[in-house]
Amino acid sequence: MDDSTWKASIRGWTPWLRRHGESLALTLAFFALTALRILYALHHQVDSDEPQHLHVVWGWTQGLVQYRDVFDNHAPLFHLLIAPFAALIGERANVLTYARLLMLPFVAVSIWATCRIGRSLWSERIGLWAGAVAGFVPSFLLASTEFRADDLWMACWLSALAVLLDSRLTPRRGFLAGLLLGATMAASLKSVLLILALGAAYGTVRVFDRRSGDRWAPPTQRPAVAALVLGFLVLPVLLMVAFWRMHALGALVYCTVRHNIAPGLGLWHSAPQRLLILPVALVILTTLGWASYRRDPRSRAQRLRVVLLLATGIYLALLESIWPLITEEDFLPWIPMVVLLAVAGMQHVLNRVARQFGPGRIARWRTAAGAAALAACLVGATFRESAWREPDPGERRLLAAVLEETRPGEPVMDLKGETVFRPRPYYYVLEGVTKWRLQSGLLPDSIASEVVGKRTHFAVPDNRFFPPAARRFLNAHFVSVGPLRVLGTDLGDQRASARSPRLFDVSYAERFAVVADGKGAGGDLDGVRYRNPVLLHPGLHSYLPLEGERHVAVLWVGALERGLVAEPETRE
């Protein structure tokens, strides 16, 4: 193709691109977002919350009751919804990949709701661009890829906003919005902050109406509000009745409320001055809201835009001022809200520019600005964590070892349920609140006694997040055999030391074997020549190695029967 033909071809496509370039850019963006999410589902590094949620879901599939039988400090709706799908997936080492793919519908609903809110308050174009940009925001992209209850929480909240900020509130729409808000609360108790923010935003706009003489304010729709409250109560009440029938209501209240309210927790202790953020933010937000309200007080859409503006800002202020442990996933429902405001603001700027330079250029500028925003988010996500990185084999190796080396029902001592398919001897998971309670003396460190009482033979590798006393106990009574540790004691390498008795402690009566350099030992166990596995009772024992025996370990005999061999343990 010569140069003139090439230029003619470009000129022929130019009018089509001018008419459809924006639609093409958005279509490509949503396809790219879908592909990117699948890639991150396969390659994103494992967050410790993900196997914790999986363990709770697995508990439901085994007939265990959340809170009563399996500790969890999250609201229950997510785990109940996922349990049937987890039963279909089954117990497999790559269960997390399948679990992450189950999050795609929640993300799709969230992006759809974002588009719907944008269309209701501004235009379909703003809604589509906001949905596309929000999906690519690095923190949103990575956090919502993970298997966590926050994905359902985000989807329910944004869907509720889509109903509330659409057309005029009727009893029917109020009831639907209430159901969605109730589902939001049943998915995460952080919804308290969102609902407080939304209520404060609506209340502030009503104050603006009265300040302006109440000339343009719609009458209070009491039947719709009553229907909203009724809808909100349905799901939480049903769940409370269900847990009461399962004799788990008290456990639910403790785990989700009382356990999480720990004196001096996190930022409550380290940064009490954060409480000043809220009043300062309220002054700023009220000023901005009033300025925005005055632009068009007759417009219902403008009132609802102010509601969205205030709710977005108040939630952030509440989170930053009073929430003790702030994590990335706390911002999942907030990011689409702030992106909507940002995209609408950009459209306003482009409209003002178009009045000076003519409307012909605005479509190209809008497409270019949107594409630049998407590219910046994509680059940010890629720099933060490549979608092409090798997946972390740690969790998969651990689950493969659990399924291969342990038997159903055998307890495994882990941190947060990362062994997923086995019960834990210790009730509490060692997440942030529990660790603070243990450190503060609000909870006793009973891990050692629970491990002994449940006759636990397996534990995960050493980890600095175990409480000090529990960590010392586990290191003294468990030996590494790969991704797991097994009951026993590593007596060390005898190469550089004189031949002398080695003392070790047994925590509960069990049959043990002595292994030297990978084979049966031949020294003296408690003064008697060792020949076969023996029953050892709790207390101190000694082993005198033979000349030439180097690395010696005492192992639970069941480990040897399963082909597990002790190896030097790496401790964090």
Image (cartoon, helix red, strand yellow):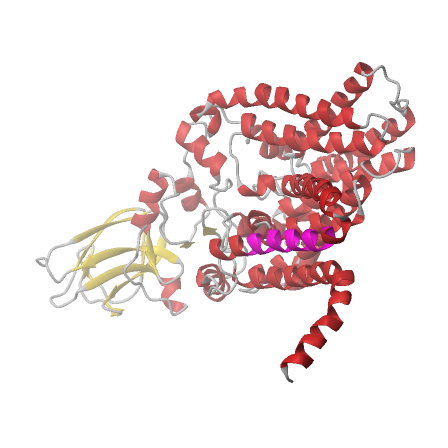
Res. 202 in view: no
Along the viewing direction, whichever of 256 and 5 lies nearer the viewer: 5
Which residue appears farthest toward the bottom when viewing the image?
1
Q: Where is residue 188 in the image (x, y as percent from the top left)?
A: 65, 38
Percent x, y for residue 464? 35, 45
Residue 372 magenta: yes
Q: Quadrant of residue 236?
A: top right
Which residue lies at the image location 51% right of the left edge and 49% below the top edge? 417
Please provide percent x and percent y for residue 285. Answer: 65, 25
Towards the viewer: 155 or 413: 155
503 sits to left or right of 237: left
Looking at this view, is 434 or 289 the one in front? 289
| Main secondary structure type of the part rendered in magenta | helix
In the image, the segment drawn in magenta is 362-378
Magenta stretch encompasses residue 421: no
Does any portion of residue 185 appear in the rendered image?
yes
Q: Picture coordinates of residue 163 (x, y %)?
A: 82, 40
